Image (cartoon, rainbow, N blue to C red):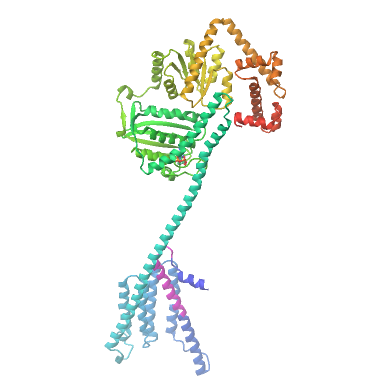
Amino acid sequence: MKKKYESLLKLGSKKSYSNNLNKRIRLLNTFCIIWIIVVLIFVSLEVIVGIALEFIKKNIITFDFINLNFFYAHFFILTSLPIIIILNKNFHFKWARFFFICVFILVNCYASLIISPGHYVEYYFLLLSLIVITLFERKSVSYFALFISFLLFLTPYYFYVVYPKEYVDRLIILETLCIFLVVHLLVNYFKESNIKSERLLALERDRVISDKMILEKQEAQLRELNEFKSHFFVNLSHEIRTPLTLIQGYTNQLNFDKSETENTQKTSIIKEQCQQMQNIINNIMDLSKMESNQFQLVSTPVEIHSFLEKHFINFQSLFIKKNITFTFNNNTLKTTILIDQELFSKAITNLLSNALKFTPINGSVSINTSFSNKGLKINVIDTGIGIQKEDNQSIFKRFYQVKNHITKSQGSGIGLAFTKSIIDAHQFSIDVDSSFGKGSCFTIFIPNTYVETITDKAVEKPIDTNKLNTITKESSLKATSKTNNKTILLVEDHKQMRDYLKKVLKNYTITEAENGKEALDIIKTKSFDLILTDYMMPVLDGEALVKQLKKEQNKTPIIVLTARSDQQGKLSMLRLGIDGYLQKPFIEEELLMNVKNSISLYKNVKEFDKVNTQEEVKNLNAYADKFNTKITTYINSNINSPLLTVDGIAEYMKISRSTLNRKVKSILGQTVSQLIQEARLEKARNLRAEDPFATKKQIAEAVGITNTTYLFDKLKERYGV
Ligand code: ADP
């Protein structure tokens, strides 16, 4: 019931209305409802009392006592007031209050002049100014209402002269005027003080709300900080744990009884991982130093092309490993920029590491440079996962990481903050343009004041890369002032990589070829002391080139460079009889040693060839082929037998165990046990690929291995399966 009454009072009010307006609407509804109730009670009493009196007087019930004017007036009130409530309900508050005031005036005039003249009903007009004060905001309206109400009050005295003459004197006018005025001022005073306290209340409420908001914000920040702390430490632990695991693993594997090369390989990985950990810690330290302005830039002019090229080469093998096309498009030959080389290098490295991390397999990444009229731009563009617009600026904030499947377990959100600090310290700018799901482009802008181009008309002309290649090739062919006169054929499709290798092998005379086919054409006309070739190349790759050279009985030593780290690739190349195999990234020293050793070995072979006739060499090769086919066929046909042993093969080949080992090593580059093991693993891998439902036991039996766990451990070690 109470609820219904409450909702009746609220009719027509709206949340969007001001508090005061809603209050006035409620007041109007209250006036209407109270008036209706009062009228109903009043009319009921009139009727009941009238009937009772009639009955007492005449002993019958006649209804003659009913005054029709009284009836009309109350009927009018009972129909008008609900209409006012309906107007309010339909949000016509202005019309509703206007109508209410009209009804009030009409009813009072009618009552004071027609229904009950001389009954002092006109005193009800006192209420008019009170009603107007509460329903209207403006003071002028309420004073006007006071004036009108007083005039209306005077009507029965002066216009209709309802009262006897002696009742009407000036004193009454003055007295009532005072009463009207006092009541009006009193109500006005209460209205004003109410408004004032409401204002204070609103201010207090606003303060409480803003305090609450601040508290909520602080709570959210604390929660975020807490989440960040745990996320940051989990990620950091992960970042550090990875190198730590590798360091631990390889340290355990170090065995000084084993060959030096094996141990060197392991220690180099250990060193690399230590460096990685060092980098993580350095980044954190550098960033905090940078942010507390303890950093001093040591800027020097740096040639941008070779600077970026160095980074390109360093990252190349990592991108190849992930099968990402990585290119470097430089349009800024002979341009130097003023940078702190060490710091700027960290910035570029961070951008490239991110591109590598956030670009999926088969994507592409490029480093581009270009000039605008205001300066030089370096872009690192990738076709990776991209960044959403709302994150574009936040990613440069310290510890900020976009939540995605990669950052869940990797990174610390430091890289880009550090990069931006470096770029800002140089007074350059960095920006990102990214399309979510498609890729990102990070741009470093270097203003002209920090860029210097050596104005050489020839250089400024658009560069014809074909021409450039021939120029380099010719110049390298012509190069004579070398410390030794050994010649190397360098087969590599990446120009930057070729340039880098040329720098490393500066003491040799280099001839360049972009792929295997070009190399074969050059070899037809010229002989070399060494062939240094890449593994993966367009047109004709390194493997095909080596096969062709071997087929042609070419004795030139071959060293293969590759980013492939799997044993399979390495073994298939070694089986072809190459002389060296270097995995990118390699140490310059390692390459130089390999080249030197292979060339001196080749010298011995040449001398041996001088002694042996062409015919003898031919026979030797034919023998090696025959030997290879015989032994491989035997192994393959007995592969499922656990009894396939070195002794068994020696018996089959009708030679002693030691002769067999020596021959296999010299012809196939492996020991007999390695040969058997390799064949078994290869067969197991093929079986697994052919029939994914085959059980481990079935596969182990098919390749003659009784210990299933051993076989699968080895497979994992070899192929990562
Ligand atoms: P981290 O890589 O350690 O998470 P960074 O400060 O280097 O921290 O990068 C901040 C965030 O910016 C990353 O978490 C990642 O979400 C986003 N980001 C940076 N580089 C790239 C990119 N090339 N592609 C997509 N997102 C990127």
Q: Quadrant of residue 656?
A: top right
Say above or below: 418 vs 68: above
Say above or below: 326 vs 147: above
- Residue found farthest to the left: 170
- Residue found farthest to the front: 256
Image position, residue 670 (x, y; %)? 61, 20
The residue sitting at 48% across, 29% down in the picture is 325
In the visual, does 447 lie left or right of 368? left
- How many marks on residues? 0
In the rendered image, the quadrant that contains the C terminus is top right
Closer to us: 29 or 616 = 616
Q: Quadrant of residue 451?
A: top left
Give the main secondary structure of the magenta stretch: helix
In the visual, does 257 lie left or right of 306? right
In reply to whether residue 515 is colored magenta, the answer given is no
Closer to us: 602 or 310 = 602
Image position, residue 694 (x, y; %)? 69, 32
Say above or below: 495 vs 406: above
Closer to us: 49 or 569 = 569
Kindly tell me whether residue 53 is visible in this rendering.
Answer: yes
Q: Quadrant of residue 96?
A: bottom left
Q: Which residues are magenta?
A: 14-37
The residue sitting at 52% across, 15% down in the picture is 557
Kindly tell me whether residue 330 is visible in this rendering.
Answer: no
Image position, residue 556 (x, y; %)? 51, 13
In the visual, does 570 lie left or right of 429? right
In reply to whether residue 32 is colored magenta, the answer given is yes
The residue sitting at 41% across, 41% down in the picture is 287
Closer to us: 496 or 488 = 488
Image position, residue 484 (x, y; %)? 43, 13
